[in-house]
Image: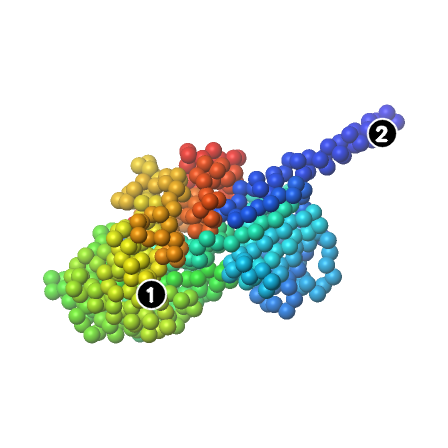
Amino acid sequence: MRSLYLKISASIVLIPLILSCSSENSPKLSEQSLIPMPVSVTATDSVFELDENTAIYAQSGNEEVKNIAQYLADRLNPATGLDIEVKTANDASVAGSIHLTLTDADTTLGDEGYELTIATSGIKLLAHQPAGLFRGIQTLRQALPAAIEKSEKQSGPWRIPTGTVRDYPEYAYRGAMLDVARHFFSVEDVKRYIDLIASYKMNVLHLHLSDDQGWRIEIKSWPKLATYGGSTNVGGGKGGYYTQEQYSDLVNYAQSQYITIVPEIDMPGHTNSALASYPELNCNEKDPNPKLYEGIEVGFSTLCTSKELTYKFVDDVVRELAALTPGPYIHVGGDESHVTPMEEYIPFINRVQDIVQSHGKHMIGWDEVTNASLKPTSVAQYWAKAEYAQSAAKQGAKLIMSPAKYAYLDMQYDSTSKYGLHWAAYIELDSAYNWEPSTMVSGVSRKDILGVEAPIWTETIADMDALEYMAFPRLPGLAEIGWSPKSARDWTQYRDRLGKHGKRMEAMGIGYYPSKQVVWEK
Ligand code: TNX
């Protein structure tokens, strides 16, 4: 009797305590460590909880929205174990569900913006375009406890603080570049990188598909490029290449996460693997039959710009690549062509630009291509020289900002970093975050800039562990530079968000660099 009395009185005291804790202990929506920081977050001080009744309702009659809904279910089901189902909006709606809807009414959201409303009764995600729904889902993931990212069932509860996020990107192009030429990365590895960059709302993966050390894409009209030119890596090893089917698989995989693949074939320099495969593309009398190269020097190779065969080669490669690439761009490199005389380099790039256009694509080149005459639809990628960035702007071409001193993910964090180079700088998290594209180069302003990109060159980076250690956590910072309004960016406040974000990266299986600049919440 007495024990029953105790139990009852204890529950009377405890129940209200538990209830009030549930909203007081969970962070407010505005205090969630969202990366990139949204344009606006309004918190309403309550919580929504995923449970057995939760379903995801996709707007009816739209297959694409249904696929996005399934993507969301696939993110939520492993950790929650809730078996959340995708239904269409015609099905009877149950309170406590998630609704994904496209709207024509809210065009201010643009191609990638979204409005996410979390109420105790359910979640509504609205966008003007499917890509906006996809980006909004990344915010929803980050609003849940970090354990949502684990691949095995966790205990929950799965609460989300209520409120509204209205959000859209600052820049249209927010990219990551992966050098698969110095070290080859498998299709599975590249898919993993796509998953990771997608969760920070990036929308471009630039694949550096050829360099002195390796040619990584099958070209049917010049088969030895891949089979011979792709047969090694920096430091030796067996290298590898993507068949055209595998490349298309990557393109489609990226597309399903609203990421465009930008393929790069670097020329006229950085071409030793092509020259070794087809010596007739070479006119270096001192070394007419170059061997495969496994070192890390740059600037020693060039296509023979005076031979007609070279332009047949470029046309064949660009034609095959353009046919496999739905995105608007072909990147032609153009960097560090130290052994191509400038009087040959300029007409070469002009002609290559025409070839790219003739296959229905726009040319991107590293900033040296501004020595040539850029069309207004071409894009220069700034990495080193301010005068080249200024020249692009003067010529009316747009810029992708990848300043090596801040945006290169292969630069070491400090002198103790186990991977990476440091020719441009040591880049700790603060300097990776604290730069502003629109004021970086005098004479280059916001209107000249298409976006930002974080390249990772892989001379010293041979596997996914090394890649993730170098990319994280600098890549989320660059993603925020590309997505969030300038006024919402602040290093000390970002550092605190990143500190709370550490356990989410851990749950995602990312072996990140635990910089001492950040207090990592365990
Ligand atoms: C310069 S950045 C290069 C690459 C190297 C990189 C190493 C650029 C356009 N070219 O070929 O891999 O430095 O950090």
Residue sticking out furthest to the left: 286
Name the N-terminal-most of marks 1 and 2. 2
Query: Which residue is at a point 58% across and 42% down the rendered structure image?
Result: 30
Give the amino acid at mark 1: Pro
Q: Secondary structure at mark 1?
A: loop
Which residue is found at the position 39% from the left and 39% from the top? 430
Q: Which numbered disc covers residue 376? A: 1
Identify whether 155 is placed above or below 456: above
Quote the CA–CA distance across marks 1 and 2: 81 Å
Disc 2 marks a residue whose amino acid type is Leu
Q: Which mark is residue 88?
A: none
The answer to whether 30 is drawn above or below residue 381 in the figure is above
Q: Marks 1 and 2: CB-CB under 8 Å?
A: no
Say which residue label 2 marks.
4
Q: Position of residue 102 (x, y in %)?
A: 60, 62
Residue drawn at (50%, 46%) of the image: 37
Query: Viewed as shown, does residue 267 lie left or right of 141?
Result: left
Q: Residues within 10 Å of mark 2 (few under 14, many from 20)?
A: few
Between residues 384 and 76, which one lies in front from this camera angle?
384
x and y, in percent, of residue 301 in the image: 20, 60
Spot occupied by residue 241 in the image (x, y as percentages of width and height): 35, 62
Asked whether residue 310 is in view, the answer is yes
